[in-house]
Image (spheres, helix red, strand yellow):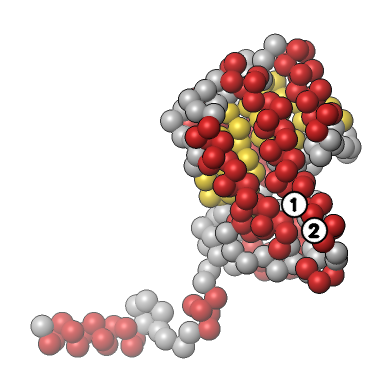
């Protein structure tokens, strides 16, 4: 198995993307500890659950010490816990937006600092779960997008400071189909319509994120650190293409221009 004998912690690993990542690590042979404030609604085969609020610095420190003591090592930390409600900036006070930044940026820093001594001992790695929201406007989730942008920067700095013993990378996710997709994309028709805007024709599944995270944690990525791996199905189709009245590539007007150029030559 790819990660046989390794020990991995996945924060927020009980549902959605986190559960997909935890399952993927378990399939790859790792001992997996998924921590979250609530246990999974459906048990995850091969995944150990631990109750933890990643915003509690003292609790986070105790948690990693317990994991290392119980399992004898720690090889990978996947900082997945995060998220945000859909909320325009004017719809909430600064304390609400600060909590989003705390969960999506400060908590991964807290977990990484607590895990670092154990990862250093095993020459392990950290995988930050980023988002395309960190690289484009994110109306309705501006604080989340800002936190994810900061998370990528944090990962690049960590990769330099903690090299060569600990590798740090970011998995930059596009839109993923989870239990909460309806909150952002609507009903099944809305989810399907949003999926059609992705070049690969669908939203990602949690397993897509899981497989990519396993790769970044595996020996196959031994020389990859400080990198951002885009898992977004090709990104977003530029809006101007749908608004433009010009012929598409290969259209009659384009072919006529080419014909004239060949004739003039």
Residue 229 as seen in the image, left or right of residue 140: left
Identified at 59% across, 16% down, the residue is 121
Residue 104 as seen in the image, left or right of residue 158: right
Can the viewer see residue 95 in this picture?
A: yes
Crowd class of label 1 (few under 14; some 14 to 19; many from 20; radius 10 Å) = many
Residue 216 as seen in the image, left or right of residue 138: left
Q: Nearer the viewer, residue 121 or 94?
A: 94
Task: State if disc 1 and disc 2 touch (CB < 8 Å).
Answer: yes
Among the 4 quarters of the image, the one containing residue 21: top right
Q: How many numbered marks, from 0 up?
A: 2
Position of residue 194 measured from the top left corner of the image (x, y, whole percent): 66, 66
Q: Quadrant of the N terminus?
A: top right
Identified at 49% across, 77% down, the residue is 241
Q: Quadrant of the C terminus?
A: bottom left
Q: Nearer the viewer, residue 33 or 170?
A: 170
SS of the residue at dot 2? helix
Crowd class of label 2 (few under 14; some 14 to 19; many from 20; radius 10 Å) = some
Identified at 48% across, 31% down, the residue is 221
Position of residue 197 measured from the top left corner of the image (x, y, whole percent): 59, 67
Q: Which residue is mark 1?
A: 101
Position of residue 112 measured from the top left corner of the image (x, y, whole percent): 67, 32
Q: Is residue 90 depicted above or below 5 in this figure?
A: below
Q: Is residue 204 depicted above or below 56 in this figure?
A: below
Identified at 85% across, 66% down, the residue is 92
SS of the residue at dot 1? helix
Position of residue 61 measured from the top left corner of the image (x, y, whole percent): 78, 25
Residue 102 as seen in the image, left or right of residue 229: right
Mark 2 and mark 1: Cα distance apart in space: 7 Å
Can the viewer see residue 186 in this picture?
A: no
Q: Which residue is mark 2?
A: 97
Q: Residue 174 — which label?
A: none
């Amino acid at each position: 198995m790819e990660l046989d004998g390794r020990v991995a912690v996945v924060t927020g690993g009980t549902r959605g993307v986190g559960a997909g990542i935890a399952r993927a690590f378990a399939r790859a042979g790792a001992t997996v500890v998924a921590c979250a404030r609530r246990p999974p609604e459906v048990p995850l085969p091969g995944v150990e659950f631990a109750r933890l609020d990643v915003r509690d610095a003292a609790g986070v420190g105790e948690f990693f010490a317990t994991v290392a003591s119980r399992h004898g090592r720690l090889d990978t930390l996947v900082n997945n816990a995060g998220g945000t409600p859909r909320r325009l900036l004017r719809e909430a006070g600064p304390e609400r937006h600060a909590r989003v930044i705390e969960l999506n940026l400060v908590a991964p820093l807290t977990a990484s600092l607590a895990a670092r001594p154990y990862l250093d001992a095993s020459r392990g790695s950290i995988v930050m779960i980023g988002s395309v929201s960190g690289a484009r406007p994110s109306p309705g989730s501006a604080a989340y997008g800002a936190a994810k942008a900061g998370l990528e920067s944090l990962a690049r700095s960590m990769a330099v400071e903690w090299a060569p013993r600990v590798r740090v990378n970011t998995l930059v996710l596009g839109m993923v189909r989870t239990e909460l997709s309806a909150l952002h994309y609507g009903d099944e028709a809305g989810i399907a319509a949003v999926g059609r805007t992705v070049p690969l024709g669908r939203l990602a599944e949690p397993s897509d994120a899981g497989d990519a995270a396993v790769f970044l944690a595996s020996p196959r990525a031994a020389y990859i650190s400080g990198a951002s791996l885009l898992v977004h199905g090709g990104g977003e189709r530029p809006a101007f293409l749908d608004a433009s009245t010009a012929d598409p590539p290969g259209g009659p007007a384009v072919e006529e221009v080419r014909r004239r150029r060949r004739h003039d030559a």
